[in-house]
Image (tube, rainbow, N blue to C red):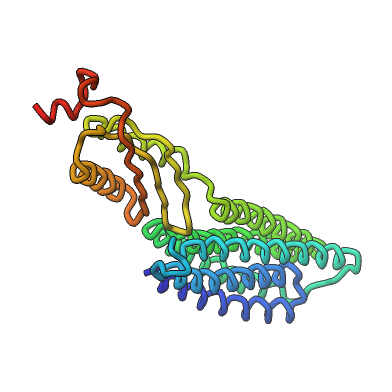
Amino acid sequence: MKKKAALLSVFSNTTLVVIKLLTGLVTGSMAVISEALHSGTDLVASLMAFLSVREAEKPADTKHPYGHGKFENLSGLFEALLIVAAAVFIFYESIARILRGAEIKMPLLAIIVMGVSAITNFFVSRYLFRVAKKTDSIALEADAKHLSADFYSSMGVIGGLLLVSVSGLHLFDSLTAILVAGIILYEGILLTKTSTEGLLDKSLPEEELTEIKEILDSYKDVIKDYHELRTRKAGSERHIDLHISVCRDESILQTHKTMDRIEEALKERFPGCKIVIHPEPCTHHSDSCPSDCYWLRLKK
């Protein structure tokens, strides 16, 4: 499913880049050219999403014992750098055109092309968002955000071209391009933040940590306590590791069953998560266990 969605994005972005670039060159509209560059970054993002999804789905091996999930984070960071570079170029070229007093031709053609682009990106981005949410794919989510931003920037370009047509002031074209560049830059900054958090092994979101703790607390009848809980995310993979304290007199078989139960509960809530549990003996001997010790209750 993830590969199919990524390929659809590659196809739509390739088509839009060619159409927008040709239209921008024919009409001389910097706003349309900026949108072609925006779609160009989306195309690169789509290609990176497809390649990273394919790599991230590979199973762990001897060189990558923790899997390949971070390929998605690397993809997102590379995309972000391209987006920022495109925004800087558009800023520079738009200001230069304002100073030169450049004019555009056939604004109606540009408006039609941008309308087709906006509609296409709207529907493709909705589809990518659905697949990203279902598969928990960072790469597809980033790609969907690119196309969503492209939809709004395309609408802005249409507004600018309409102002040019009505007022005859070609300045609006370059001003619209600067607005598009601002949207692209903001998008790049957000994507950089999201991608680097995964590469730096940032803990899972607070709401997910709360759910994990609630699951662990529900097993207080068979464990003494838990500590050193650590979490991180690599691509769409969640990693959870922790220490649990169990009665020092229980069998290794009983401890293993307890660990299996905890793992099953966590995986039911977070499918596909990787879990490492380290058991430790409690500090009490059997003859000095607290009266509410669960292991004493089991032996009775």
Horizontal side of 41 relative to 137 (left or right) equals right
Q: Is residue 219 left or right of residue 26?
A: left
In the rendered image, residue 233, in percent from the top left (x then y), is placed at 47, 52
Residue closer to the observer: 123 or 276: 276
**Residue under the point 62% across and 76% down:** 17
Task: Say above or below: 37 vs 242.
Answer: below
> Who's the residue at 47% across and 71% down the image?
55
Residue 252 in picture, x, y percent from top left: 22, 44
Most foreground residue, 147 or 153: 147
Residue positioned most to the left = 300
Image coordinates of residue 184 in percent, x first then y, are 67, 59
Q: Quadrant of the N terminus?
A: bottom left
204 sits to left or right of 115: left
The relative height of residue 87 versus residue 207 in the rendered view (above or below) is below
Q: Position of residue 122 (x, y in %)?
A: 50, 63
Left or right of 264: which side holds 186?
right
Res 168 quadrant in image: bottom right
Indicate the quadrant where residue 61 lies: bottom left
Q: Nearer the viewer, residue 157 or 21?
A: 21
Kindly identify the residue that appears in the image at 62 percent across and 81 percent down: 18
